[in-house]
Image (cartoon, rainbow, N blue to C red):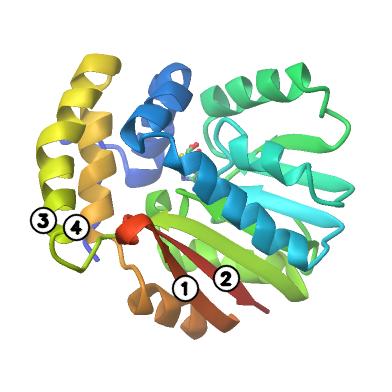
Amino acid sequence: MSKVKPYKNSDLGKKEQVTQMFDNISGDYDGLNRVISFGIDIKWRKRVVEIVKKSNPDTVLDIATGTGDLAINLAETNATKIVGLDISSGMLEIGKQKINKKSLESKIEMVLGDSENMPFEDDSFDAITVAFGVRNFETLENGLKEIYRVLKPHGTFVILETSVPTKTPFKQGYKFYTKNILPLIGKAFSKDRSAYKYLSDSASVFPYGEALNNILRNIGFINVEDFPQTFGVATIYKSSK
Ligand SMILES: C[S@@+](CC[C@H](N)C(=O)[O-])C[C@H]1O[C@@H](n2cnc3c(N)ncnc32)[C@H](O)[C@@H]1O
């Protein structure tokens, strides 16, 4: 898999560039998310919560939590502790404000950290989620190995990530949208134009469906299943340890 990075003229590694990019766009992120996905991202995160709910976890880790939308949605489970981890302090700051507004500080803790080297003991969490995060990891396998390490045996791991529709006419429609419409939205709404180019470029090369299932199996995850959403523009992956 080629390593798509946000900024062409930067010598920084992918991790540093991704951190810088999300710090830059943190103030625009929630609004842009709604526009880009026509608001469907809200429904997808709700589906992730439904899957997590079934395993009745006490502790949940939401990796690449960003501005905390999934962590906040997870507060409706019976979990007593939800930890949101992210490498961008800018994204976390917006998330903390949302959590405070909803008086969820006692349930949700926001932690600054790297998914590829997490500050948690082995076998710490009953469930782990990542929404639109794995695509941004510097090294996907390292991030997934860390997730496997901190997930409890029999724990539930759920990924929500962009994917690419394979059926006509959705395949063509998706290509047109990401090539022609998405950059215009990025230009119109965000100060950081490369960010939105990066988001669509990285989506087009990221493994999805059976390819990602196999990567998860190679790490050691079991009972791996994928559930394409909305013509396959996103996919939910459920697995266990
Ligand atoms: C597209 S946002 C997704 C945010 C949120 N999960 C959502 O559903 O809206 C991706 C997030 O991944 C974070 N991220 C990227 N690489 C990371 C890493 N190595 N460790 C932790 N977070 C990372 C970014 O800072 C960013 O907040």
List the residue tagged with mark 2.
Answer: 238
List the residue tagged with mark 1.
Answer: 226
**Front: mark 4 or 1:** 4
**Front: mark 1 or 3:** 3
| On screen, residue 25 above or below 126 | above
For the residues labelled 3 and 4, the Cα–Cα distance comes to 5 Å
Tell me, yes or no, whether the two marked residues, 3 and 2, touch with CB atoms within 8 Å.
Answer: no
Residue at image location 10% in from the left, 45% down from the top? 176
Residue at image location 60% in from the left, 48% down from the top? 46
Determine which quarter of the picture holds residue 60: bottom right
Inspect the image, locate mark 1, and give the three-letter code of the amino acid beneath it: Asp
Inspect the image, locate mark 3, and give the three-letter code of the amino acid beneath it: Gln
Expressed as whole percent of the image width and height from the top left, the position of residue 64 reads 55, 45
Answer left or right for 141 relative to 127: left
- State the residue in front, 237 or 124: 237
Tell me, yes or no, whether the two marked residues, 4 and 1, touch with CB atoms within 8 Å.
Answer: no
List the residue tagged with mark 4.
Answer: 170
Image quarter in which the N terminus is found: bottom left
**Front: mark 4 or 2:** 4
